Image: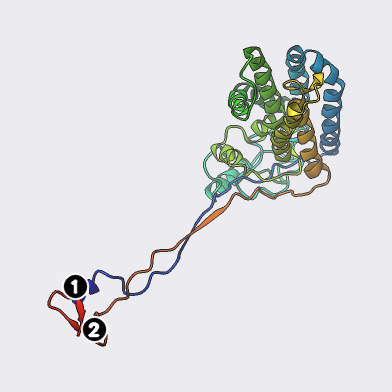
Amino acid sequence: MSSSALTHLLPATPAQPIASARLLTPTTHPIPLLSSPSAKKYSYIHTLVVVIYYYIRASALVADPFPMMLTDLVVVGLAQAVFCAVCLPSAGSWVNGTAAGKIIDGTGAKGSRNTATKGAASGSGSGNVRKKLGNSGAGKGDGAGGSWRGRVMPTFFSLILTLILPPLPLTIIALVLGAPLYPTSLLPHTLLLAAHVSLLGFLPIFYTHGVSSSAWRDVAAAWLPFDEAGVWAGTVGAMVGGWVGAVPMALDWDREWQKWPCTVLWGVVLGWAIGRVVTNVARLGVGVRINLSEKEVETEPDLLPTGPMKTLPGTTKKSDGSHEPR
């Protein structure tokens, strides 16, 4: 093939590095804490009460894990439900995908439909629409979380979703990460452990976000922002704490409390509490997301320069296009 035929096949300039970024796009905002004094006080008390309760029940957990964990589901679920109703706005009463501003207790939801429509049109993403509450239309008992009667049903449905949806996937994750398959009598313990993790880590998310596809996409991507209510930090802390809590089980101390799933459950509770203290009490990292961004730089291979082929000094060009020494 002659040099003139190669000219139109080769690029005019050498290849340049092509930078392409693959970034997740979060659509949610931090879950607000209701501004009433009772909400702030109870958010602190709630963390302490849950930890103390699990500490008191530690001996019963070691003696017989299954009935203890089954009974405590009722107590922990009730405590988490009260926390949600007192401290958090329910799904549909705040704007989670646009700039919602501060949630103010005592503000009514009347006249907020137009604002919600504008917020949805400005890029809140897929999922259910959140209503932005303003300072107008204040009504007695109708705060950012709604009236007490209006908070009961969201809490009830959130409990149902929490006990139905997350436990099975969490059980599978636990088995993949090393939870015992044999003897099979331990499988109910693993399922109850997953239910406790679900109540501690996911009930407040169901209560505040409902089944919004955009919100749960951020949850699955671990990109929900840390919030002043301590919801997401508690979820992350529970997952990390459960993983760390499995470490003592492998030690050859031959202690009764090393059996499955005692240390894992304690790790879940401690991790949940630490996460809540960091964001809810110390207010550290509020609004920050776990960075899972990823960039790739692809470089094309070097190609031959364009233009007519030149004959090197001391060589002659043959009829087939090759060169030979003189």
Residue 71, relative to residue 324: is it above or below? above
Q: Nearer the viewer, residue 218 or 185?
A: 185
Residue in the picture at 65% in, 46% down: 29
Q: Position of residue 6 (x, y in %)?
A: 22, 72
Which numbered tag is attached to residue 94?
none
- In the drawing, does residue 311 fall left or right of residue 193? left
Residue in the picture at 25% in, 83% down: 310
Mark 1, residue position? 5
Quarter-of-image position of residue 9:
bottom left
Which numbered tag is attached to residue 311?
2
Q: Position of residue 169 (x, y in %)?
A: 58, 27
Badge 2: few (under 14), some or many (20 or more) residues near its Cα, within 10 Å? Answer: few
Whether residues under marks 1 and 2 lie with C-beta atoms below 8 angstroms apart, the answer is: no
- Assign a secondary structure to mark 2: loop
Q: Position of residue 308 (x, y in %)?
A: 24, 80
Amino acid, disc 1: Ala
- Assign a secondary structure to mark 1: helix
- In the drawing, does residue 309 fall left or right of residue 319? right
Residue 65, relative to residue 199: is it above or below? above
Alpha-carbon distance for marks 1 and 2?
16 Å
Residue 148 appearing in the image: no
Badge 1: few (under 14), some or many (20 or more) residues near its Cα, within 10 Å? Answer: few
Going from the N terminus, do you reach mark 1 or mark 2 first? Answer: 1
